[in-house]
Image (spheres, grey):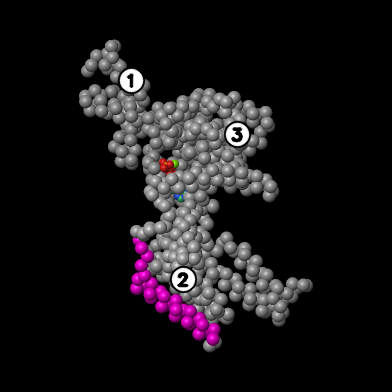
Amino acid sequence: MIRVENLTHVYNKGLAYETKAVDDVSFTVEDGAFIGIIGHTGSGKSTLIQHLNGILKPDSGKIFVDDIEITNKKTKMAEIRKKVGLVFQYPEYQLFEETVYKDIAFGPKNLGLSDDEVDFRVKEAMALVNISFDEFAERSPFELSGGQKRRVAIAGVIAMKPAVLILDEPSAGLDPKAHTDILNMISMIRKQTGNTIILVSHNMGDIAQLSDLVFVMDHGKLASAGPPSEVFADTAFLQGIGLGLPPATEMAHYLAARGCAADNIILTRDELVDFLAETFGSGGEAK
Amino acid sequence: MIRDITLGQYYPGYSVIHKLDPRMKIIVTMFYIASLFIIEDFYGYVLIVLAVAAITAVSRVPVRFMLRGLKPVMIIILFTFVLNMLMTPGTILWQWKFIKITEEGLYNAVYLALRLILLIIGSSLLTLTTKPMKLTDGIESLLKPFKKLGLPAHELAMMMTIALRFIPTLLEETDKIMKAQQARGADFESGGLLKRAKALIPLLVPLFVGAFRIAQELAMAMEARCYRGGEGRTKLNALKFRRRDAVAVLLTAAYIGILIAERVLL
Ligand SMILES: Nc1ncnc2c1ncn2[C@@H]1O[C@H](COP(=O)(O)OP(=O)(O)OP(=O)(O)O)[C@@H](O)[C@H]1O
Ligand SMILES: [Mg+2]
């Protein structure tokens, strides 16, 4: 469980250009939950999540991971890094080893695991991100495509087996297929590991489909939190802070404007297809 | 944090000092540095400190911000201070076994440390109040006469511009990669020399790869906009010598005059 209390982070404190990137944010994340974080560019999402494994220190406020106060100076950071894995925005730029294998092994080795355990974890992580061990283990990470690099970088974090996996815009800048691959990979990781997952994304469709709970950031503040069906019901609020709707929800709005309204909010493509099939398909009749 | 390095940093502002012609500011700074070596006694230092304080006040750069630039060189200053204090022969003030402090040594040490501090503060005033682009414009313009001797003034200035432009970018990149590797359990802070040097590999490799990527992208972007060196290039914001620059020159002349007078007469 992660508990954040009144977290505030100010960059360049005391200078003319100081920015309050995170402003008095509090929330709780239950074990096994899938949290989606959305917010306009510069709203403080990346800053917020970098606190959750102690990479950034707050200016005020407290963070507890499984009741360990990680904002306490005495807390061993290695323990926290083991529990909370963080995949940064554009993680492919952190690759550095000669081979894919060695790069993925970097994290587990830093945890002080035995060679056998490291080997096991690397293979497991590569399978999870769908990078074939036989084909890629001995290749240089710099020779891979952008999407492959990204998956190798994600494997490097997964191999540390964190109980909480945080991903910062894992599909930014990828083509549609690579994007879908990454998303499927995340669903798969969740299914197989039961991890708590925190996903930061600008893609409302992905967030609506995957999250149990959505956090909305606006100018450093937690502007709203709730299940997708609630958060995405407030169109005016979302548009007011520069965000949009999931494509399926938007489509449902167009349909409603033409007199074909659904009873419940529609969030995903599947729900939309079901609704259309019910309304217009062979089984149903046009209203 | 690595971003706190202020050496060569610009502090945005709209003061008269900010607006002065960069060529003039560079020359004045050179005169200022020379002036540090004219003076020899207490009153001379008082004059210089007053001058620097006045310029700082006019420029509205916070003193705290300026002093931060001293942090990285503090060790050098302390070192020269102690060395001078202990190594100068003369009248002994205090002695403990073979360590002695002399009157001359103390004077020397204080003056030298002051000189170094004033040198750094004075030159950071230049960089703090001048945009890097303007600074290189100024350097290019000042180097122009040497073009006839085969000095590639424009190219040198362009190289400086690019280097200055990318210092913050590379620092940001370093910061990001460091954080990412720390998230994978990398430890940059503990262990012996060898272990620490080894720990830098996960930082340096991605940093170099990134630097080369950035350089390549920049070169392409410049070529795409038809950059082909300095021949026949004109400037959007040509440097102009204005009344306020003339005033600054007069003030500098007065300053140097007073310092020389002080040295000769007192
Ligand atoms: N290292 C830093 N130093 C100074 N300011 C920063 C730094 N990182 C972020 N900021 C500022 O803090 C604010 C929040 O940035 P942050 O990166 O957390 O936003 P974000 O929500 O992740 O945006 P994006 O969607 O573009 O990734 C922004 O105003 C940004 O300019
Ligand atoms: Mg971000």
Q: Which residue is mark 2?
A: B27
**Residue at 51 percent of width and 82 percent of height:** B260
Mark 3 secondary-structure assignment: loop
User: Chain ID for label 2?
Assistant: B
- Can you give x and y, in whole percent of width and height, for residue B4 in the image? 52, 55
In the image, A276 versus A8, the foreground residue is A276
Magenta-drawn stretch contains B263? yes
- Magenta span: B237-264
CB atoms of marks 2 and 3 within 8 Å: no
In the image, A207 versus B38, the foreground residue is B38
The answer to which image quadrant residue B244 occupies is bottom left
In the rendered structure, the answer to whether residue B140 lies left or right of residue A123 reads left
**Residue at 54 percent of width and 81 percent of height:** B43
Q: Is residue A104 in view?
A: no
Q: Is mark 3 within 8 Å of ligand 2?
A: no
Residue type at tag 2: Ile
In the rendered structure, the answer to whether residue B238 lies left or right of residue B205 reads left
- Give the distance between the C-alpha atoms of the residues marked 1 and 3, in whole angstroms: 44 Å
CB atoms of marks 1 and 3 within 8 Å: no
Residue type at tag 3: Thr
**Residue at 37 percent of width and 65 percent of height:** B239
User: Chain ID for label 3?
Assistant: A
Q: Which residue is mark 1?
A: A273
Q: Is residue A153 above or below residue B47?
A: above
Residue type at tag 1: Val
* Numbered circle sitting on residue B213: none
**Residue at 64 percent of width and 35 percent of height:** A109
- Can you give x and y, in whole percent of width and height, for residue B85 in the image? 67, 73
- Can you give x and y, in whole percent of width and height, for residue A16 in the image? 42, 58
- Give the distance between the C-alpha atoms of the residues marked 2 and 3, in whole angstroms: 53 Å
